[in-house]
Image (cartoon, rainbow, N blue to C red):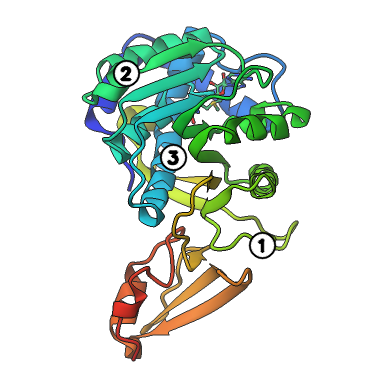
Amino acid sequence: MSALPNDLTSALDGVLTRFPRPVLGRSVERLIGHYREGTPPARPILGSDVDVAAYACYRMPATYAAVRSVFDQVSTVAPGFAPRTHVDVGGGTGADVWAAADAWPSLADVTVLEQSAPAIALGRRLAESAASTAVRRSTWTHGVIDTSVDSPAADLITLSYVLGELAERDRADVVRWLSRRTGMLVIIEPGTPAGYERIAAARDLLRDLGLRLVAPCPHEGACPIPRGRDWCHFSARLPRSSAHRHLKDGALSFEDEKFSYIVASPHDWRRAAGRVLRHPRKPRGQVALRLCSDDGTLADVTVSRRQGARYRAARDVRWGGEWPPADDDLIDLD
Ligand SMILES: C[S@@+](CC[C@H](N)C(=O)[O-])C[C@H]1O[C@@H](n2cnc3c(N)ncnc32)[C@H](O)[C@@H]1O
């Protein structure tokens, strides 16, 4: 379960009290409609204070959970990665900035580029109450992505839930632009077939540009997922606050945010030997894993109780995690 940090939760609770619930609720409905359409919007979706507040309360906890879970996977394969600088492009109300500060306390210099003035105003306001100095001191730049100027330069660059809002003809240029001066580029999209297609295109482009794929892929060959029948995506579970439940009209105390992603770097990091592509199934005495393997193929692997330490390790592995584990040599194979 990936919960928001307490300081962000309190700051968001403060936002909720500024608008009547029915007004926020209507705005949430509008936003859900826009995001369901899934086509690049003619105008910025986050156009007013109330839309931005609704976004922060109903979407930011979910995007935070997805981003934070991607950062966990990056830290697993690149434990030595300790970014000092971060640029978040299309940062909205700052989910990535909060998640990055939580994952990497080394961050000291953080910049958000965002086209929506109300999103910047709220993002800044939330950031002021952060325990993290990097978040509190973050710089918020108002502007539209412009690939004709110098590429942003930072140890970490993030682009989460933004590609789908760009015109299709601009996406490759934006990915190329972001790839030029970064130590780690993280791109995240909704875990839908369309979101995966955008990630798959970015993946191929980044690899062709000579960057190394860090995660989730265990190899740099063609993606083996059968197009049109399946798509590579993962899931992050997050708790829903009562305000969140009220706004989204849901009864469950949690939700699962589905996302697709690609992380690439100019540096060589360890890659997972295999990536778990589904919730593991656990028939009695067994763990069944659907894997993307380092030989570029999909594989179904069953680990049985007879395999001792390996079985105990498999019981803990999650959808999106790596298998076999990095310290596989240490696991007793019988
Ligand atoms: C769905 S929100 C995602 C916000 C944040 N990255 C997150 O994951 O919560 C997409 C954001 O990208 C911004 N955006 C879209 N196109 C942009 C562009 N061309 N230049 C700058 N920002 C852009 C939008 O204003 C919006 O804040």
| Residue at image point 63% right, 68% down | 296
Q: Position of residue 320 (x, y in %)?
A: 46, 58
Query: Relative to the observer, which residue lies in front, 145 or 198?
Result: 145
Query: Relative to the observer, which residue lies in front, 71 or 232?
Result: 71
Query: Cα distance, mark 2 to mark 3?
Result: 17 Å
Decide: is 153 above or below 225: above
* Helix, strand or loop status at disc 1: loop
Decide: is 112 above or below 293: above
Q: Name the residue under label 2.
A: 127
Query: Which of pointers 1 and 3 indicates the residue nearer the eye?
Result: 1
Q: Where is residue 312 in the image (x, y as percent from the top left)?
A: 29, 77
Query: Which of pointers 1 and 2 indicates the residue nearer the eye?
Result: 1
For label 2, count other residues whose C-alpha is less than 10 Å away and answer few (under 14), some (14-19) or many (20+).
Answer: many
Query: Cα distance, mark 1 to mark 3?
Result: 25 Å
- Residue 2 visible at all: yes
Report the quarter where the C terminus lies: bottom left
Q: What residue type is labelled 3?
A: Val
* Helix, strand or loop status at disc 2: helix
For label 3, count other residues whose C-alpha is less than 10 Å away and answer few (under 14), some (14-19) or many (20+).
Answer: many
| Residue at image point 35% right, 18% down | 138
| Residue at image point 51% right, 40% down | 186
Query: Cα distance, mark 1 to mark 2?
Result: 40 Å
Q: Name the residue under label 1.
A: 221
Decide: is 224 above or below 26: below
Q: Mark 3 points at which residue?
A: 67
Q: What residue type is labelled 1?
A: Gly
